[in-house]
Amino acid sequence: MFGVLVVLNIVRNFHSYILFPALRFIIEDFSVTYGLIGFVLGAYILLSAFAELLWSFLSDIKGIGRRILIFVGVLSSGIFSLLCYYSSSFTMFSFFYILGGVSLAVIIPFSITIISDAYRRGERTQKLMLLEILGGIGLALGFGVSLAANAYLSSWKESMLILALVGLFISFSILLVPEPPPGFSEDEIKDVVVRYGYPFSLRKEDFYLIVNTPSNKYIVMQGLFGTIANGSLQLWLVQYLVVEAGFSETAASIFLAMGSIGALVGIFIAKLADKAYIKNPRYKPLIAAICSAVEGFFFILFFLVPIRANIRTQDFMEASLEIFAMSISSVCSLLGIVFFFVAMIFNSPVGSIRDSAITDVNLPEFRATVRSGADILETFTKGIGITVVGFAVDVFGNLRAILIVMMMFWFLSAYYWFKLVNPYSTDIKRMKEELLRRKGEIIRRHQHYGSAGL
């Protein structure tokens, strides 16, 4: 099942990033503005976040099987991508593209909950991070297919046709793969889940329990501040290198890619978090707190280094050779790559630790809803952070200094991770006790039904 989840996340990222290399062609073909295309992409992100919650409700409250929902979502995205290919107006193209994103939002929460049901608490962090890393292939696939369509096929729209065919093919293969029942990995109830299933669903009164679980509050709070910093990086980092450090867009992407390799090393921190959890659950949020603080420190060091380049070529090979030469000859450039590399080592495991922590302190029927709700809140703070940076640049004109300030939000994220350390073990213990109570309830139900049948 893990391999299928990897493929699904590749498809999701494929859809999310397929338009970026073709933005100029889309604007020319449909005679629209950058502002309008930016509005569509913003709506795509926001509506996809809300769609995560709606998909989660269908599973957690209505009890509809996750495999069926994923099938419907991926099949719908394939159909909408096909309609994008045949759309002759920007309005219809945007409408179907957003609907495709809304459909694929089904993948995010259910990937996490299926992993939490398939793997025990001491294994989830590294699995979630591996899923994120391998799912990132979709990013490269989206860019690559779009660039290839622009260069070798009749139109950028051909990439939407390829995306549609991939979605339609993958959707039907999902039905062939079994999913673990909710609660299957929980030692407290595994034996009865295998025999009787997990009959519980999310109720209205459960929302009070979710909101008043201390660990959920701190997990959300760290995410809000961490997303402000991370969102600022995602949108403005390349712009900083182009405008203030003298890179071309191609050179800036290569320079950052060299440093981003550090994210792969983060898998060892995720593995450490799982092993540390087995010894003492408190170690998991403690590791996340240290990671957040260290990444903030090294991102600030990266921006403090006075990197100066004069690379204006957009040719990939020429830019690569010039960056290599600059890295050898310039201490500042080498330090910049090293600092960014180290920052990415500690940045990459935080998200998977967050997701595994949500599964650790919430009952199986709560997890998708809690994860989706947190994602909605983080989407808003991410947008706020990006907007603030944009207006601050207009006022002060110094992107580098503003980004240094934004990196300080990592320390606030670390603070709330530290706050999570104490209630974390208590909330895990409370959840285990509730699972044992539910185990008894499941057994009593079936004993009652068995007696009634006699």
Image (tube, rainbow, N blue to C red):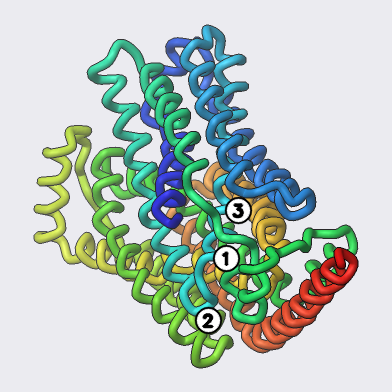
Q: Which mark is residue 284?
A: 2
Residue closer to the observer: 427 or 228: 427
Q: Quadrant of residue 214?
A: bottom right
Residue at image position (52%, 71%) is 353
- Crowding at mark 2 (Cα within 10 Å: few <14, some 14-19, many 20+): many
Residue topped by disc 3? 109
Q: Which mark is residue 379?
A: none
Residue at image position (80%, 67%) is 211
- Crowding at mark 3 (Cα within 10 Å: few <14, some 14-19, many 20+): many
Q: Is residue 418 above or below residue 12?
A: below
Q: Quadrant of residue 249?
A: top left
- Crowding at mark 1 (Cα within 10 Å: few <14, some 14-19, many 20+): many
SS for tag 2?
Answer: helix
* Quadrant where the N terminus is found in the figure: bottom left
Q: Tell me which numbered mark, 2 or 3, is placed earlier along the sequence.
A: 3
Residue closer to the observer: 84 or 217: 84
Q: Position of residue 111 (x, y in %)?
A: 54, 54
Query: Looking at numbered disc 1 in the image, what kind of residue is underneath it?
Result: Asp
Q: Position of residue 280 (x, y in %)?
A: 54, 91
Q: Are marks 2 and 1 in contact (CB under 8 Å)?
A: no
Q: Work out which residue is located at the far front of the displayed protein and give it.
A: 454
Residue topped by disc 1? 117
Please say whether residue 347 is visible from this viewpoint: no
Q: Are marks 3 and 1 in contact (CB under 8 Å)?
A: no
Q: Position of residue 337 (x, y in %)?
A: 26, 62
Closest to the camera, between mark 2 and mark 1, is: 1
Query: Looking at numbered disc 3 in the image, what kind of residue is underneath it?
Result: Pro
